[in-house]
């Protein structure tokens, strides 16, 4: 049994598998799928059982594995060797974008006869770029793509240059090569600016992926809300309703703030009109002078009198 396959499973992980009509078994862990014979599959289970760290794994038969295999098209063949990042990821490129995959899964398919293809490379949706491995025309495996940041694009510009100038993430979404009626559309729900970024299968359901957008930077949120394709119009109605309610609340808040500001202004005017009149500086000076003169007059001895003191 290929050690690279065994090493992809660990304690509490799951072995996902399905039997193909051609007699083969397709096995994976949620991040990749590999084709193997029934005897190799038995050898994998034995090898995993012998490892203490994998003793608690679950063996799960699921049609999702075969569903992924049946949808594997591979629209762009990768003929150049990958650029390896820190021995952890394999990076490929076409003329306009990058595709990145976990190296430990790529090592499973190191057979020189395998041919590599990227699925849906016309789209800029990173998570739709499954790597399809073919051998003799059949799907030998699938490796799911890694997500990477806009910063990584900038860092790789010199190492793995692209023929076409890189577009911003918003521009890439709005290009919408599939001409989907919703992808690239922007909405505002009263709190966040939203953009429909992608459409893809999720757990057997056809879903739209909606991200929030920072307007100034154009950066998308890492997490996305998922909306079923057949519920999209209903969701747009909910966003519009939330936006209208938020605008109404803002209008009422502004109106209340203006009213409070008016009341404060009137109260201030009232205090000014009814406050005791303040003396001018000149009046204060003259008043202080009179008080000082009166004090001095009371303190001076009277004329014609004797000064008190000891007599000789």
Image (tube, helix red, strand yellow):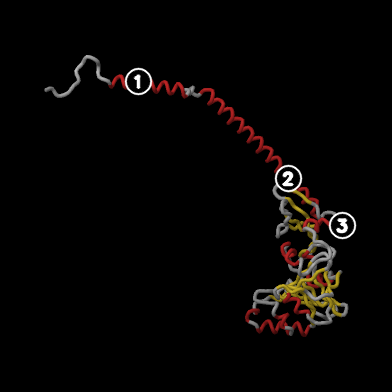
What's the residue at 69%, 77% (across, down)? 9
Residue where numbered disc 3 is placed: 179
Q: Position of residue 83 (x, y in %)?
A: 76, 73
Number of other residues with Cα within 10 Å of mark 1, as a class: few under 14, some 14 to 19, many 20 or more: few
Please name which of the two marks, 3 or 1, marks the residue nearer to the observer.
Answer: 1
Tell me which numbered mark, 3 or 2, is placed earlier along the sequence.
3
What's the residue at 73%, 48% (across, down)? 189
Element type at mark 1: helix
User: Residue reaching furthest left?
Assistant: 312
Please name which of the two marks, 1 or 2, marks the residue nearer to the observer.
Answer: 1
Q: How many marks?
A: 3
Q: Mark on residue 178?
A: none
Mark pair 3, 2: CA separation: 27 Å
Residue where numbered disc 1 is placed: 293
Tell me which numbered mark, 1 or 2, is placed earlier along the sequence.
2
Element type at mark 2: helix
User: Which of the 4 image quarters holds residue 252?
Assistant: top right
User: Which of the 4 image quarters holds residue 267?
Assistant: top right
In the displayed structure, would residue 51 be above or below residue 233?
below
Element type at mark 3: loop
Mark pair 3, 1: CA separation: 97 Å
- Who is closer to the viewer here, 44 or 184? 184
Q: Position of residue 5 (x, y in %)?
A: 73, 80
Q: Mark on residue 243?
A: 2
Mark pair 1, 2: CA separation: 75 Å
Q: Position of residue 170 (x, y in %)?
A: 78, 56
Number of other residues with Cα within 10 Å of mark 3, as a class: few under 14, some 14 to 19, many 20 or more: few
User: Residue reaching furthest front?
Assistant: 312
- Who is closer to the viewer here, 247 or 20? 247
Number of other residues with Cα within 10 Å of mark 2, as a class: few under 14, some 14 to 19, many 20 or more: some
């Amino acid at each position: 049994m290929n050690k690279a396959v065994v090493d992809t499973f660990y304690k509490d992980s799951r072995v996902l598998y399905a039997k193909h009509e051609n007699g083969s078994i397709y096995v994976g862990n949620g991040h990749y799928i590999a084709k193997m014979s029934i005897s190799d599959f038995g050898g994998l289970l034995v090898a995993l059982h012998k490892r203490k760290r994998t003793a608690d794994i679950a063996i799960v038969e699921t049609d999702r594995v075969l569903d992924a295999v049946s949808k594997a098209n591979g629209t762009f063949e990768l003929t150049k060797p990958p650029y390896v990042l820190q021995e952890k990821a394999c990076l490929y490129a076409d003329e306009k974008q990058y595709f990145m995959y976990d190296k430990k899964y790529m090592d499973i398919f190191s057979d020189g006869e395998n041919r590599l293809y990227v699925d849906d490379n016309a789209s800029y949706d990173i998570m739709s770029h499954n790597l399809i491995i073919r051998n003799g025309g059949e799907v030998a495996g699938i490796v799911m793509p890694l997500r990477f940041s806009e910063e990584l694009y900038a860092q790789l510009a010199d190492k793995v240059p692209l023929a076409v100038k890189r577009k911003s993430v918003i521009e890439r979404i709005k290009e919408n090569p599939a001409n989907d009626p919703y992808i690239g559309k922007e909405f505002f729900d009263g709190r966040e600016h939203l953009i429909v970024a992608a459409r893809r299968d999720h757990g057997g359901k056809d879903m739209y992926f909606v991200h929030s957008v920072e307007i100034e930077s154009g950066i998308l949120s890492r997490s996305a809300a998922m909306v079923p394709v057949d519920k999209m119009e209903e969701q747009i109605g909910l966003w519009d309703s939330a936006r209208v309610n938020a605008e109404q609340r803002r209008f009422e808040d502004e109106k209340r703030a203006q009213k409070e500001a008016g009341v404060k202004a009137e109260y201030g005017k009232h205090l000014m009109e009814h406050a005791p009149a303040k003396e001018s500086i000149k009046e204060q000076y003259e008043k202080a002078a009179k008080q000082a003169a009166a004090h001095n007059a009371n303190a001076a001895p009277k004329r014609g009198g004797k000064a008190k003191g000891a007599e000789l």
